[in-house]
């Protein structure tokens, strides 16, 4: 592996980690630095039709799911598979997403086991997410926490 390939791999994995931390900490402005202005999005596993949408619309979907300030969450990404060809990359990562809120009707826990399939583009040296598809492997608990 070349030094540049290793740098690209690290930057792309870090982008996905920053995505998860931004969700957990409700730092919505982070998405301005890691997402393209327009994204191809497929969240059909959660009933949201695949579409090309502006960044703000994509972020609003997550803001809705993470709207309860008392809900705690932890997004953990691992098992990265990354391929870089020039200024475009594809990446797959496993997600273990844990969500908890005391005394929530229907149950206090929801866990998402999934994979993100991403396409990224490099502009001015920085990688940005241009497309993403969520593949749900299985869930546990009360999906109402994020619905």
Image (tube, rainbow, N blue to C red):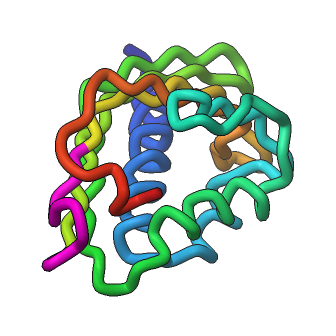
Q: How many marks?
A: 0
> Residue shown at 68%/65% (left/top)?
60
Residue in front for this viewpoint, 88 or 21 = 21
Q: Position of residue 113 (x, y in %)?
A: 26, 33
Relative to residue 33, is residue 79 drawn left or right?
A: left
Residue in front for this viewpoint, 84 or 18 = 18
Range of magenta residues: 102-111
Q: Is residue 118 above or below residue 74?
A: above
Q: Is residue 83 above or below residue 120?
A: above
Residue in front for this viewpoint, 120 or 124 = 120
Q: Position of residue 27 (x, y in %)?
A: 50, 77
> Residue shown at 62%/23% (left/top)?
89
On the image, which quarter does residue 99 sit in?
bottom left
Whether the magenta-drawn stretch holds residue 110 is answered as: yes
> Residue shown at 25%/35% (left/top)?
139
Residue in front for this viewpoint, 43 or 84 = 43
> Residue shown at 67%/45% (left/top)?
128
On the image, which quarter does residue 74 sit in?
bottom left
Q: Quick one: which residue is furthest to the bottom in this view?
A: 69
Q: Position of residue 18 (x, y in %)?
A: 43, 58
Relative to residue 125, is residue 52 drawn left or right?
A: right
For the N terminus, give its image quadrant.
top left
Mostly what secondary structure, the magenta segment? loop
Relative to residue 46, is residue 51 drawn left or right?
A: right
Residue 121 in view (yes/no): no
Whether the magenta-drawn stretch holds residue 45 is answered as: no
Relative to residue 115, is residue 103 drawn left or right?
A: left
């Amino acid at each position: 592996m070349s030094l540049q390939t290793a740098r690209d791999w690290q930057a792309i994995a870090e982008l996905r980690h920053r995505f998860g931390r931004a969700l957990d900490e409700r730092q919505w402005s982070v998405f301005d630095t890691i997402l393209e202005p327009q994204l191809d999005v497929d969240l059909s596993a959660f009933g949201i039709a695949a579409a090309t949408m502006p960044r703000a619309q994509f972020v609003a979907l997550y803001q809705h799911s993470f709207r309860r300030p008392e809900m705690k969450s932890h997004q953990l990404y691992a098992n990265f598979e990354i391929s870089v060809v020039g200024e475009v990359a594809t990446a797959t990562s496993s997600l273990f997403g844990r969500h908890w809120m005391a005394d929530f009707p229907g149950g206090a826990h929801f866990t998402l086991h999934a994979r993100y399939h991403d396409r990224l583009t490099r502009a001015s040296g920085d990688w940005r997410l241009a497309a993403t598809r969520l593949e749900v492997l299985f869930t546990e608990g009360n999906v109402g926490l994020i619905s």
